[in-house]
Image (cartoon, rainbow, N blue to C red):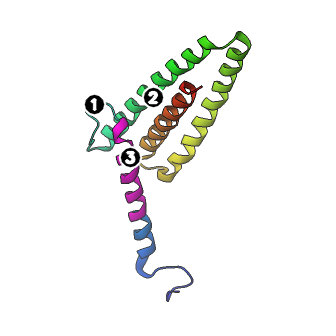
Amino acid sequence: MTARGRGKQPNGKGAVAMAVLFVASMASAFAAEAAAAPAGCDAPLTTAAMRECAYEEFLVASEAMAQATQGLRERLPPARSSSLLRMQKAWLAYRTEACRFEATAAQGGSLAPVLQWRCAARLTRERAQALADQ
């Protein structure tokens, strides 16, 4: 306990600690996804470059998912193929909302779009793999 009350740090140190944790988690997330980054995006230096690279990652993942979906559709009977398309439509809505939520970690900041595109790329890569595995 501190002098200012339960769980609060004096002199704004709590806010500084939260900012440090946020920056550290962002650096970790960027490093983890660097392997999936398109050429030229291994170390973007500006927020605009980060946003562009995150979007490019999303496009690559989207193409992989489209190919996996098409491959699966070709192996399914028509009734299941229609069901797959309905399922994909629902999954796309889920991905959109999940990534909007993730982006609220930087709501109003210039990193919000970066977070949203990186989330969309990550979830899309995972979905492409799940479809390919079926």
Quarter where residue 82 is shown: top right
> At 53% across and 86% down in the image, what residue appears?
1
Seen from the viewer's position, the closer of residues 26 and 127 is: 127
Q: For residue 133, what is the image quadrant?
A: top right
Q: Position of residue 28 (x, y in %)?
A: 38, 53
Tell me the quarter of the picture where residue 13 sits: bottom left
Amino acid carrying mark 3 in the image: Ala
- Label 3, secondary structure: give it: helix
Q: Which mark is residue 91?
A: none
Residue 85, x across and y down, in percent = 66, 19
Q: Is residue 28 magenta?
A: yes
Question: Which is nearer the N-term, disc 2 or disc 3?
Answer: 3
Q: Which residue is mark 2?
A: 61
Please give the range of residues in magenta: 20-36
Q: Secondary structure at mark 2?
A: helix
The residue labelled by disc 1 is 39
Give the class, few, some or many, for how many residues have Cα within 10 Å of label 3's Cα (few <14, many ≥20).
Answer: few
Kind of residue indicated by mark 2: Ala
Counting residues from the N terminus, which is met first, the one under dot 1 or under dot 3?
3
